[in-house]
Image: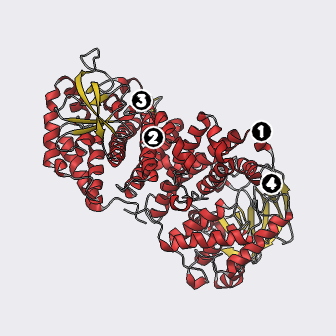
Amino acid sequence: MDYDLGEAADNLRQRLRTLMATHLPPGFLGAFTDDPEDLATTQAFCKTLAAEGLLTLSWPTEYGGGGASVWEQTVLREEMWAHHEPRGAQYMGVNWVGPAIMRYGTAAQKEQHLTAISSGDVIWCQGFSEPEAGSDLASMRTRAVRDGDGWVVNGQKIWTSYASMASWCVLATATDPEDGGRGRHTLFLIPTDRAGITVRPIKSMLGPHHLNEVFLDNVRVTQAEVLGEVGGGWQVIRDALAFERVGIARYARCESLLERLRSELGDEFDDLPESLRVRWMRALIDLRVARLLAYRAVSLQNDAGATAAASSARIATTSCDQSVAELLFDVVGPAALDSGPDAHLDGAIDDHWRYAQAATVASGTIEVQRMLVAHAVLGGR
Amino acid sequence: METALPEHITDFGAVAAERFAILGGPQAALLTESDRGLRRRAATALRELGAFDLDVRASTDELLAAAALCRAAGATLLPYPVVEELLAVDGAKLALIDPRAPRVDHGDLGESWRLADLDGTLYTVTMGSAVAGSGGHAKLGPFTVAAQNLQLAGAVPLSDVRLHLILTSWRLLGAVERAVQITSDHVQARTQFGKPLSDFQTVRFRMADTSVALRGLEELAKFTLSRWTAAPSAIGWTDAVMLKIQAADTSFTVMRTCHQLLGALGFCDESDISVIDRHIQPALRSPESAVALTVRLLPNLAAGDVQTLFSTPAAARS
């Protein structure tokens, strides 16, 4: 029994930290701020990662990736999230769109898209959620109707991250099973500047650029743009979700923020009320447990219990995310409401609190995760 | 990274659980409350398994075996001070106490004991009789004995104190795993409003959260063992105390859920949940409560001794 991530993973962690210390400005809070320079920083940093062979570290070597071990991929997830995801919107293309194209794409699709993703040249978004299909994704209503050699798509997507800056979209549609497919969902890889697509940003507490509505009005798509088989979209979606199953390493940012705040407080740490310091200690235990559950999920990712293990890890880490957000606020007091470079931790406390509100909603709500764990424990629905 | 226990350790744990189960599990532990001599059978089972020959300080393998043994003892609610026996020196069992209110689970068993507090201070004591209760013994911790006349008697290695906390946590892990299994079986079998309790979403969500808590404790218990070293270390101390805090808090949460989902049945001694909850109370609360243990770690927290992905190694701080 050994919880050491290994020398290669440790070396990677140090390499990434050095790169980020060199290329990210002080107080960097990610791509989704009011400062357009931050978005430019992420795009430049992705180029740096690509040049270092680190952007597609997890990809197989045959597709130009690094062929990294699951533990190196784990370190990459931890370090990127802890440092406010400096890959910005590239995250989605690298983490699941590329791997999905590798598995289900045609030779032409691989040729067209994989190099563009691995070089950091292109931003992708996923058109999955709809106003009437959130957690219940299978009930999506956006329709693709046969028209000659292709289809015409009409409908609406919502909560589409990065859509306002993305040049490509994985679009999930409902197709007619009578069209020859096995199921009623089909995925298309389409450019976001196609006629009939309108993107409308949604203002939110998460910051600019993040959430969007996407309206599809008589959008024409072709057979060549189908990812996988017609009617086989649900399988691709399930696999795509599996690529992301372990989820964001939220515990890493929480540990980073607590460590930074402890350093910033210095001797004043001991002046905090004991009740707050007890909560702080409790949070560090919970974060260690969340990290270990994430490692367990990685270890079991090819086992029958992989889904429940990943859901358990997500429940633990998203719960930590929100309790640490409250703890940081309580430690700093009303000054935590401040944002900007003069605020505590350069405004990271405000930023973390806002993002933490989405932790138990994004990428599968905590209720869905509980349903999956309960199914493993009790069977049934 | 290999997060699974070695196969031979898992096998040993399974053999131990089978041997202990022959004694009768929680209902046998209940009978032992009124016939304390039955604890001899537990001692015999431990001897047959080689528990008294395990040297937990000698090797990682023997420590892992001891942890598996404690987990099996917890799962079968073995009425015997297993952890205290595993840490015995020259036949004197080691118990951790709060010197302000020294209580020893199974303290009436055998004459030779070493009692230490969390700072490693060793005491000689006079063991009293069982803590009184309505049936001649306490309901919570029915084998608890009050120690008296504490006299300073030197110190025990802090590594022994850490081992005690770790192995007690493994025993608690086994006990709450058993409780969750009982509760899982119950909610699937018990029908109300025309359907099994396990069909109600509130029950399913509560069981899901319980499962997450249990798996979290298991991972932390394995992780802490994997890092254990006898060498004095502030990080080793925080590791052990963090595990005991988590074991206690998880046990409270899990047992609360088990009681709630079993309803009135859970209070009855004919239900194993009641017996498990009563018998694990000394391990949960001794030598100090989870909150008191957390307060103990605050100086370590301030000093950066709680290792995270971003903590500075001690060597780099000095």
Residue at figure coordinates x 50%, y 57% from the top left: A307
- Local packing at callout 2 (Cα closer than 10 Å; few below 14, some 14-19, many 20+) is many
Mark 2 secondary-structure assignment: helix
A285 versus B285 height, above or below = below
Q: Amino acid at mark 2?
A: Ile
Residue A334 is marked as: 1
The answer to which quarter of the image holds residue B171 is: top left
Q: Residue furthest top?
A: B134
- Local packing at callout 4 (Cα closer than 10 Å; few below 14, some 14-19, many 20+) is some
Residue A207 is marked as: 4
Looking at the image, which is closer to me, B47 or B233? Answer: B233
Mark 4 secondary-structure assignment: loop
- Local packing at callout 1 (Cα closer than 10 Å; few below 14, some 14-19, many 20+) is few
Q: In which chain is the residue bearing label 2?
A: B
Residue B245 is marked as: 2
Residue A226 is marked as: none
Q: Amino acid at mark 3?
A: His
Q: Are marks 3 and 1 in contact (CB under 8 Å)?
A: no
In whole angstroms, how far apart are the C-alphas of marks 3 and 4?
Answer: 44 Å
Q: Amino acid at mark 1?
A: Pro
Q: Nearer the viewer, mark 3 or mark 4?
A: 4
Badge 3 and badge 1 in a common chain: no
In whole angstroms, how far apart are the C-alphas of marks 1 and 4?
Answer: 21 Å
Looking at the image, which is closer to me, A336 or A360? Answer: A336
Question: Can residue A215 be seen from the camera position used here?
Answer: yes
Q: In which chain is the residue bearing label 1?
A: A
Left/right placement of residue B290 relative to residue A97 reads left
In whole angstroms, how far apart are the C-alphas of marks 2 and 4?
Answer: 38 Å
Residue B259 is marked as: 3
